[in-house]
Image (cartoon, rainbow, N blue to C red):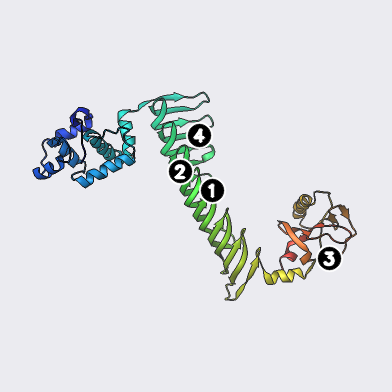
Amino acid sequence: MYIWKQSFLKKLGNSLCLILLILNNSTVADEKMKEFSSLFSPPLSAVQTKAFFLLGVDDSAKLEATFNRMSEQNYTDSNDINEDILLEFLFDESEGKKIGLSAKEHREQRLNPTEVGTLTYPLGHKYVGDIKSGNPHGTGTMTFPNGKEYVGDWKNGNVHGKGTMKYPYGKEYVGDWKDNKRDGKGTMTTLDDKYEGDWKDDAKNGIGTQTWRIGDKYVGEWKDDKRYGRGTFTWAFGTSISYKGDWKDDKKDGTGTYTWKNGDKYVGGWKDNKKHGEGILTFANGKVHEDTWINDYTQEFIDGRNNKRFKPYVACMGAPAERQINIMMNLFQNRNRPAAVTYMLDNGCTNSWSRPIRGRDLEEFSRNGKFIGVKTKVHMTGVGKIYAIILADEWDSN
């Protein structure tokens, strides 16, 4: 049993008064009204009772539920809950749902209406729209000195709700915002691509679709602006059709299926964008190869390469060795051939090493077109560790 102490009619707003004027001419079963009215002390008037009925509360269970919802939403700081406050809550709850506001937010908007005006800021920002307590609140447009423009919802000075942010150079975001960050559902369009999907904390997080201008497309999970989780990438051009499987930090990682346009298909493990682990490669002609893969190569292939001998090429330019090797690969790529037959060592250059090097003693550290940068895994007798360039065709074939 609730004890209501204040007269309902004393605190009604204009909107509620209008509702009650209409209710004076409505009819509700007398017995049901008396039963509901008796829940209060003193009992409600007929008009008050009809107001509760109109707002969907017509028995003790619904009254109890209303009280609980009001408490959960911290609708009022008052401990003196009466029929006035309950009816105001029901009204604000009903009207707030129509515009996406909670009962408390609608009450604040009703009691503290916004004004329309213009705000200018020292750094050159300009706002035109709804203002509350000196801050953007409601709907409005903010223009920025760097060319950005936001049109949409605001809350207490922050971008909050739905809106459109236009950036320089053709970039645009349309969707949900929370506390000045993209958060919820939204679409980001640039000159090169378009993303539609979930956002959180100003980044792609959740499920989304990204389509590139050239026709490539990814549909799946995202984490902190990177493909992460399950997803499908489809290529518009080239030798590949699609990859469907696990991703980590924008790379194929986990298990997945890769399909080529010639009909070949690989199903199995991936790591760091390379086939890695147990996998099955099915060729278009029906041949099936099941093997263990390590960094895109089968164990069978690796065993074969370990037993091969490779002739290294490099033009000696001084330390640091790996950086200079990459420079030389770029030069070799432009010339389409190795330039010189010398070797780069930890302690400088020498022509004393003339023998081919076994594959098991080499490891790849860089790749550029037809050339691969390699280094010996251990120091070679008398000369130290060798850094060199070898031909990719030789390295990638048995």
* x and y percentages locating residue 294 in the rendered image: 66, 65
Q: Amino acid at mark 2?
A: Asp
Q: Residues within 10 Å of mark 4 (few under 14, many from 20)?
A: some
Q: Residue at x 30, y 42 (%)?
A: 69
Q: CA distance from mark 2 to mark 3?
A: 58 Å
Amino acid at dot 3: Pro
User: Relative to 26, is 397 above or below?
Assistant: below
Position above or below: 173 against 79? below
Residue closer to the observer: 78 or 345:
78
Amino acid, disc 1: Asp
In this rendering, position of residue 51 left or right of residue 369: left
Instruction: Looking at the image, tell me whether mark 4 or mark 3 is earlier in sequence order.
Output: 4
> Residue 32, position in %: x, y?
12, 45
C-alpha separation, residue under disc 4 versus residue under disc 3: 60 Å
- SS assignment at label 2: strand
Mark 2 → mark 4, Cα distance in angstroms = 19 Å
Distance (Cα) linking label 4 and label 1: 21 Å
Q: Which residue is mark 1?
A: 225
Q: Secondary structure at mark 3?
A: loop
Dot 2 alpha-carbon crowd within 10 angstroms: few under 14, some 14 to 19, many 20 or more: many
**The label number, if any, that marks residue 154 in the structure image:** none
Distance of mark 3 from mark 1, alpha carbons? 46 Å
> Going from the N terminus, do you reach mark 3 or mark 1 first?
1
Q: Is residue 214 visible?
A: no
Mark 3 lies on residue: 356
Local crowd at mark 1 within 10 Å, few (<14), some, or many (≥20)? some
